[in-house]
Image: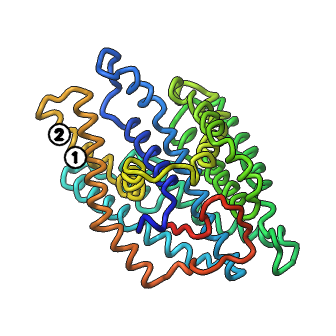
Amino acid sequence: MRSTQRLLSLDVLRTASLLLVLGRHTAEIPRLREPFGALMTALHCGGWIGVDLFFVLSGFLVSGLLFQEHARSGAMRWGRFLVRRGFKIYPAFYAMIGLSLFAFGRRGTLLAKPALAELFFFQNYTPGLWLHTWSLAVEEHFYLLLPLLLLALLRFGSRGEPGARDPFRLVPAAWLSAAALLLGLRCLNLWRPFNYWTHFMPTHLRLDSLLLGVAISYLFHYRPEPIAALQRYRGLLGVGGACLLAPAFFFEVDATPWIWTVGYSVFAVGSGLLLISLHGGLPRNVLTRALAYVGARSYSIYVWHFPVRYWISDKIALRLGLGFAASTALFVTLSIVIGIGLAAALEQPMLRLRDRLFPAGTTGPVHGIQHAGIGSIAALTLE
């Protein structure tokens, strides 16, 4: 996981997404009279938008791996892709779940259905052991569906031409179709009382964010000219993206029907604009390198942050009688520090083992993908 192999700006975006999620998962909704209370109230309200940023970024990076492999070899080894994803996702996740099973079992609070939901990645349709792992289920389902989708689009989009210059030309249309379909499915929920497992977490309601990332990745790889033209206005793109995300910080998702219908679509587009704006556009300095360092380890931090809060930081805060500001600072700090430590102890050794057993095969020139000086996307490696 060397920083020279990564795009710094995307890791900084990961860190921003992570901090939003941590803000959402603070121990309590702060009172306005607390220091920075209004800011933290807004962050607690809308910090879940960090997951949507993660989704768009994940779709962008993961699909890029498959685009690059097809450009080099003319094929997509979906089995190898899934194995490499497994080495990235499963060790930290199942270590956390294993420890949770042990801890809840000792206390006599372990139930079979939540445990099975976590173990088999359907905790976004029924309650699992932890509230935050629903997004990992959505990602897992996306990893299974993406190769199938791209193979289907490749078959119809290349028109039978083995060396087609743009074999994935149907990707934008697929995203638009999926976005319209998922919006329709979300609107069907308007007649049902809000429930996180029916209105917020299901894969079939949230995949359009990931597929937008795939569409943006397609443009970067196969249609770089319009992306390069857009990036001449990075500032406007960034402001526009932030404005599209802003409503999440003022309207509670469970009390605002337009948030969990049209809002998800709007937030996906806002996240996409931020991605295009920041991609390759940040200077390399002490601050951005530090933020990118955290972002490169954001998966482990995300996986462990709820256990860190409930098992460690909340107990310390209660024992010391800390106020909201101090307990929040403790929670965020410990989540990042412990997550970085566990990434070094577990995630990174498994990635090194994976790269020895199942090399990525993403080195060397990429043929068939256009380049327009918009960043070394073809040279990017993703764990």
In which quadrant of the rendered view does residue 36 lie? top left
Estimate the x, y position of residue 321 in percent, counting from the top left.
14, 29
What is the tally of numbered marks visible in this picture?
A: 2
Report if residue 123 is visible in the image. no
In this figure, which residue is indicated by the disc labeled 2?
Answer: 315
Q: Which quarter of the rendering shows the N terminus?
A: bottom left
- Relative side of 184 to 82, left or right: right
Residues tagged 1 and 2 counted as in contact (Cβ below 8 A): yes
In this figure, which residue is indicated by the disc labeled 1?
Answer: 311
Residue toward you, 174 or 230? 230
Estimate the x, y position of residue 146 in percent, counting from the top left.
64, 64
Residue toward you, 337 or 104? 337
What is the three-letter code of the residue carrying label 1? Trp
Task: Looking at this view, name the residue that lies furthest to the left.
Answer: 319
What is the three-letter code of the residue carrying label 2? Lys
Report if residue 164 is visible in the image. yes
Depicted 301 relative to depicted 43: above or below: below
Residue toward you, 250 or 96? 250
Residue at screen point 37% across, 38% down:
25
Residue at screen point 52% across, 69% down:
381
Residue toward you, 32 or 382? 382
- Relative side of 378 to 306, left or right: right
| Label annotation for residue 224 | none
Mark 2 secondary-structure assignment: helix
